[in-house]
Amino acid sequence: MTALLELADLRVSARSGRADREIVHGVDLTVEAGQTVAVVGESGSGKSLTMLAVMGLLADPLHLTGGAVRLGGRDLTALSERKLRAIRGNDAAMIYQDPMTSLNPLMRVGDQVIEAMTAHGVPKAEAGRRMLDLLARVGIPDPKRTARAYPHEFSGGMRQRVMIACALAMRPRLLIADEPTTALDVTIQQQILALIDELRRELGMTTIWVTHDLGVVARLVDRVVVMYAGHVVEDAPVRQLFSAPQHPYTKALLAALPDPSDDDRPPLAQIPGRPPAATDPVEGCPFRPRCSQAVDACATRPPLQTRMQGRAACWVPPHEWRN
Amino acid sequence: MTAAVAGQQVPVAAPPTRTAAWRRLLRSPAGLVGAVLVALVVAAAVTALLGMTPYDPIAQHPQARLQPPSTQYWFGTDQFGRDVFSRSLAGVGNSLRVAVVAVFLSALVGTTAGICAGFYGGKVRGPVLAVTNVLFAFPPLLLALTLAATFTRNWLTIAIAIAIVYVPIFVRVSRGPVLSLRETDFIKAARVLGIPTWRILVRHLLPNLAAIVIVQVTLSLSWAVLTEAALSFLGLGSPPPAPSLGSMCSTPRFWLVRPGGTWRRRAPSSSSSWSGSICWATGCATLSTREMDATHDGSPW
């Protein structure tokens, strides 16, 4: 297997005044071609920022302060904006969180799908034909007629389908789905998840799901990367992650998933405290203040170490955990 | 796959047509009145610019000086025996020509600068806003006067002078919305899809800005008519003997005491403020109909 996407010690900072404040603290991550990975973490854990950095879309005051992003062996951080633009939407595509606002309200949906192709040099007539196929493929009924509609005439689910059509128009090798279903109804969520998963298989796309909901993607991914406060804390095959979490934070996350089949209805598990703000100075393990397993060693930051078939950043192995 | 979406109906309204928009405009009283007034003024201007006035506006008839209105001279004649009706038509033509060109230029330059300042920030924003602020610091009429006095005067340079005065308004009006549009998801989504920046500006940003710029254009048109009239009233408009509403208001001041003077003063000044208020009425009318459009079917313009 070859690595399609490699992040090496990726660091993202925000400029505030004269100081730089690091938000993503050196993410190492390799995604093999054809693999499906979920990146999970709370809001502010840096997961979306990491993905924006991959797409080269960090906008002022955010900027890359170190590390490399290699897509198919090519270092994207060294590319000019022009070359990056040619890669965006072409080799690497992204589906956004909020389909309600992600389409231009003044442009017919068909034209927006066409534009995703003409921007990468597809002739207009061909783009028009492919647009109809694409709309049909993502499940938009009567594409000929609906292509002439404006976004406001569509429901959220339909708009997300159009966004998917835009993103996949150039058959990208890498798809980043950044919480694509958060803004949708649960029933529609399942349809959209199934659609993306189907298209992923069809096009052989490497896919990264960014989410804060472990339950949603558990069945769709091969591997889960857990992020906390700008660090990768665990990276493991999905089964192992659920059956034998190697990091106390992962374990706490899993415990916070409600189990509907539980008759006793115990109070929902919570993780006490809150993640450190980007302004807080963090020494040692970032999860230490909230961790039930913290020991003295946690005052120094644990590196990602191989644990079973994955990696985890914790000094205390699970068999030593107190309950 | 299609099974998953069975049952989802997509209502697709008939695309709005131009004739439908016209019908809506004419159905509202404000729109109807505005349309009629605009038609009248534009007709007068076109008549004059095509040289189809009853008399040559600058031809003097020494034997018929200071005539009261009659069937021969509808608005009477001035101190040189020139037909005031013809001169009024020509004045309206001149005013509209100056106003349209001035507003077109300032909208073009101002909106472009505003979009660049809003979208790019940083290195573009500083200089653009500095120039804008300097221009804003002058009272508009004073600045227009200075510019008009500097150039050789003809209708085009007057238009350019007025355009320069109005540029900062368009910069400010367009920059603000660009700042918020820049952060909207659909602009970000366009970047994610790798759409080139110029194309994002032209196809995604500009159309969403159009509503605001169009309202500003209609307002500015009426102001520009009045600014042009004020310039020529003060003697810095189109040089005599070119007919101009402002100078036609100005000159008869000296003839007020003469018999038959009062109505001559009235004709061009009222027609100047007419065209001003008419443009404004048009603005209101278009705005109201646009709003109706928007609430009616949410369609873009």
Image (cartoon, coloured by chain):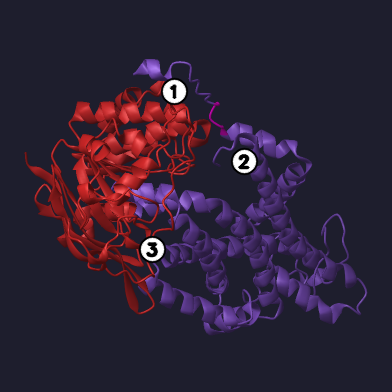
The N terminus of chain A, quarter of image: top left
Q: Are marks 3 and 2 on the same chain?
A: no
**Observer-nearest of A27 and A55:** A27
Where disc 3 sits, the SS reads: loop
For the record, the magenta segment spans: B13-17
- Disc 1 and disc 2: Cα gap in Å? 22 Å
Check disc 2 and report the residue beneath it. Answer: B294
Q: Secondary structure at mark 2?
A: helix
Give the color of chain A as drawn. red
Horizontally, is B123 left or right of A149 in the view? Answer: left
| Residue under label 3 | A276
Percent position (x, y) of residue B153? Answer: 56, 77
Q: Report which residue position mark 1 lands on.
A: A145
Chain letter of the purple region:
B
Residue at (49% x, 66% y) in the render = B110
Q: Residue furthest left?
A: A1
Residue B296, quarter of picture = top right
Q: Above or below — where is B251 with respect to A76? A: below
Residue at 48% in and 20% down:
B8
The question of residue A63 being in magenta is answered with no
**Amino acid type, residue under disc 2 in the picture:** Ala
Image coordinates of residue A11 in percent, x first then y, are 24, 63
Q: Main secondary structure of the magenta part?
A: loop
Q: Residues within 10 Å of mark 1 (few under 14, many from 20)?
A: few
For the residue marked with disc 3, what is the amino acid? Pro
